Amino acid sequence: MNRTPIVGISMKIYKNNSSEMIEYAENLKDRTEEINDVDVFIFPSMGTLYPVSKVLEESNVNYGSQNIAPLENGAYTGELSIESLIDLGANYVEIGHFERRSIFNESEEMISDKVELAVNNNIKPIICIGELEKDTENNVKEYLKQQIKSSLSKINIDQINDVLFAYEPVWAIGKKDSAEHTYIHKIHSLIREILKELFGIEYTESVRLIYGGSVSSKNAEDILNSDDVDGVFVGRFGHDIDQFFKIINLAREKNN
Ligand code: PGA
């Protein structure tokens, strides 16, 4: 199965200055102009999403938000509506990042509502899953299986190919280095197995799985060196556009 490699970055709330983010987005737009063998996405911080969307609306770079409200509109003070996301021309959204689950108490139920909302509005959800601590392979499998099953519980089986999963072991987020690449490869193959067990191969073989958690230009090549890893989700080590672009190029080599 040939799945297009995909590389993305979340700025969390590290980069909140519009002019700085416009410059970053313009740079990314220019450097990816001729690139069509890898999908690239960016989730800017909420306050810079509008100016970044203006730069990227006519580009090869996909963009979106790090979260959405679980309903289209209504009494959800302080949240971003999917209606605004559509209005901004976005096509991706991050759902269920560990920081949302832990700091903002996002429940599995809420995550499944957000996934349903995104898929029904043609916005691709990147669903973050990952165990909290290092554990046995069996326990990790059970934990991820439950997260996957619950996140997809409100969509139809033929919509499963519209979602992407980001495997982000919580213990590897915000660290000096990623999880061991051999471990990442093993867990990605486990996730494929889980998807097959739950929904059958015909509905899941084109679902893309990316790894996130302290990805850098130093470890990305090894991480990407497996058929079960379709890309990477970058954080801090992509703040420097040259570094992020190096990682994008490493993912392109998967096609060659
Ligand atoms: P990090 O963030 O690369 O800075 O650890 C990754 C993430 O949380 O997605």
Image: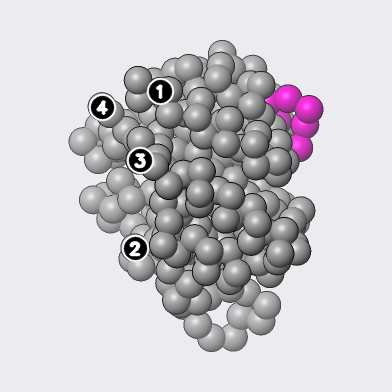
Image quadrant holding the N terminus, namely: top left
Mark drawn on residue 254: 1
Q: Of circles 4 and 1, which is in front?
A: 1
Q: Nearer the viewer, residue 55 or 233?
A: 55
Work out whether mark 4 precedes mark 1 in sequence or the reverse, and give the earlier one: 4
Pointer 4 residue = 1
Q: Foreground mark, 2 or 1? A: 1
Q: Is residue 139 visible?
A: no
Q: Work out whether residue 72 can be spotted.
A: yes
Do the residues under discs 3 and 1 have CB atoms within 8 angstroms? no
Q: Secondary structure at mark 1?
A: helix
Label 2 Cα crowd, 10 Å radius (few <14 / some 14-19 / many 20+): few
Residue at numbered disc 3:
36
Position in image of residue 102 (x %, y %): 72, 52
Residue of label 2? 122
Specify start and end residues of the magenta stretch as a single range: 172-179
Q: Quadrant of residue 9?
A: top right
- Measured in 3D between alpha carbons, the distance from the residue under mark 3 to the one under mark 4, in whole angstroms, is 18 Å
Give the CA separation, mark 3 to mark 1.
13 Å
User: Magenta includes 178?
Assistant: yes
| Label 2, label 1: how far apart the Cα atoms are | 27 Å
